[in-house]
Amino acid sequence: MAESKTLRKPIFTKVDQLRPGTSGHTLTIKVVNTKMVLQKGRPDGPQVRQIQIAESLVGDETGMIIFTARNEQVDFMKEGATLTLRNAKIDMFKGSMRLAVDKWGRVEVAEPDSFKVKEDNNLSLIEYELINIVEE
C-alpha cells in the first residue's frame, strides 16, 4: 500500500547566501550573459554525441555568480531569461565559486520577473583558499 507523501515547498536561496561546498539550493535567477567554453562532438556508438559547456553570468537582486551550463542546459541560457535552478550546488574552480546543476537537479524556465540583477556583487570574483586546521 502506497502512502501519499506531501511534497515539501522549496526554500528559495538568494545569490548572496551561497557559500563554498554547499548544495541543494533552489534559486530564481536572471541570465546576464553567456559565453560558450567548449563545443565538440564525441563519437559514442551509432550517433555522435555533442558536448557543450557554457559559462553564464547569472544573478538576482542580491548579487551575481557564474553558472556552468552543460549540454541541454546551454539552450536555457539566453540573455535576459528568468530561470529556476533546483538542487544547484557550488563547485570550486581555481579558488572561486561556480554554480552548477548536475544530473540530480533541474533547470526550468520561470515566469519573467521584474527584479534587477545587482551587478556590483559578483561572488565568482572572490577568491577562496583552503586552509587545514590542525587541532592539538
Image: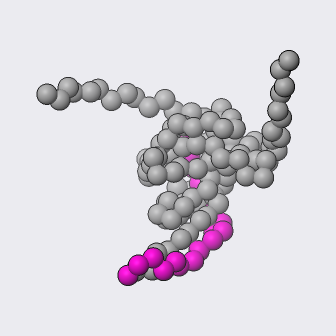
Q: Quadrant of the C terminus?
A: top right
Farthest residue, direction top? 136
The residue positioned 57% from the left and 37% from the top of the image is: 23
Residue 55 position within the rendered picture, expressed as x and y whole percent measured from the top left? 64, 60
- Looking at the image, residue 13 sits to the left or right of residue 37; the answer is left
- Main secondary structure found in the magenta portion: strand
Q: Is any atom of residue 17 visible in this view?
A: yes
Q: Quadrant of residue 63?
A: top right
Of 114 and 68, nearer the camera is 68
Task: Decide which of 114, 71 is in the foreground and name it.
Answer: 71
Assess whether residue 38 is covered by the magenta stretch. yes
Q: Does residue 16 appear anywhere in the picture?
A: no
Single out the residue that lies furthest toward the left.
1
Instruction: Judge left or right: residue 11 versus residue 120.
Output: left
Q: How was the colour assigned to the protein in this rendering?
A: one colour
Q: What residue lies at 82% left-to-right and 32% top-to-bottom? A: 132
Q: Is residue 14 above or below residue 118?
A: above
The quadrant of the rendering that contains the N terminus is top left
In the picture shown, does residue 87 fall above or below 43? above
Left or right position of 97 against 24: right
State the image quarter where residue 18 is shown: top right
Identify the residue at the far front of this view: 136
Q: Please state the horizontal and vertical placement of residue 127, each as a whole percent of the image.
A: 82, 44
Image x and y of residue 6, in percent: 29, 26
- Number of callouts: 0
Q: Is residue 51 magenta?
A: no
Q: Residue at x 50, y 74 (%)?
A: 50
Q: Which residues are magenta?
A: 27-46
Residue at 59% x, 74% y is 39
Q: In the rendered view, does 128 fall on the left or right side of 113?
A: right
